[in-house]
Image: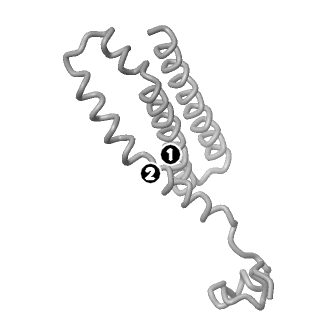
């Protein structure tokens, strides 16, 4: 028995008659997208706690003290992971919102490209800023 979702699959009764007649199943990307979003959320939970605690420790600190704390290797690595994960999670979430609420295909594609570009740009700019602080502090 193959796992491809053919007529011998246990999932067949869950398909609509039209889907069965057309031989169509799921788009096969929804589950992957769901798990990516959940994994990035789980990764962000401890990183947000660390980020907030780090920011609170910097209240009242001078600029050089803040730069020195960010430039510490573990802090620079954690900041990088935090920001890349944050932008990736934001992109995944915005993608779902656009897919669900924008119904004109051309606008949807334009918005998806814009979100991907802006999240990528934000991640790259953040990594550049962290690297610049880490290597010049």
Q: Quadrant of the N terminus?
A: bottom right
Mark 2: which secondary structure?
Answer: helix
Work out how far the residue at label 1 is from the one at label 2, CA to CA, in angstroms.
7 Å
**How far from the left and from the top, in percent, is residue 41?**
44, 51
- State the residue position of label 2: 41
- As drawn, the label of residue 120 is none
Disc nearer the start of the sequence (1/2): 2
**How far from the left and from the top, in percent, is residue 38?**
48, 57
Q: Quadrant of the C terminus?
A: top left
Residue 120 location, quadrant:
top right
Image point (59%, 57%), residue name: 33
Image point (78%, 89%), residue name: 7
Up-down relation of residue 26 to residue 106 (above or below): below
**How far from the left and from the top, in percent, is residue 69?**
36, 20
Up-down relation of residue 52 to residue 43 (above or below): above
Circles 1, 2 touching at the beta carbon (< 8 Å): yes
- State the residue position of label 1: 89
The residue most toward the left is: 60
**How far from the left and from the top, in percent, is residue 91?**
54, 43
Q: How many marks?
A: 2
Mark 1: which secondary structure?
Answer: helix
Up-down relation of residue 59 to residue 8 (above or below): above
Q: Name the front one of labels 1 and 2.
A: 2
Q: Between 60 and 30, which is closer to the camera in this rendering? A: 60
Q: Is the residue marked by circle 2 packed among few (<14), some (14-19), or many (20+) residues within 10 Å?
A: some
Residue 35 location, quadrant:
bottom right
């Amino acid at each position: 028995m193959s796992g491809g979702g053919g007529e011998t699959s246990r999932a067949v009764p869950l398909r609509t008659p039209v889907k069965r007649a057309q031989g169509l199943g799921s788009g096969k990307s929804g589950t992957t997208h769901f798990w990516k979003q959940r994994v990035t959320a789980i990764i962000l939970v401890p990183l947000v706690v660390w980020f907030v605690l780090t920011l609170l420790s910097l209240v009242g600190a001078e600029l050089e003290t803040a730069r020195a704390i960010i430039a510490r290797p573990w802090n620079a690595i954690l900041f990088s992971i935090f920001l890349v994960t944050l932008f990736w999670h934001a992109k995944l979430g915005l993608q779902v919102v656009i897919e669900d609420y924008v119904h004109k295909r051309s606008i949807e594609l334009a918005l998806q490209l814009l979100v991907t570009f802006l999240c990528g740009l934000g991640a790259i700019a953040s990594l550049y800023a962290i690297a610049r602080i880490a290597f010049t502090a």
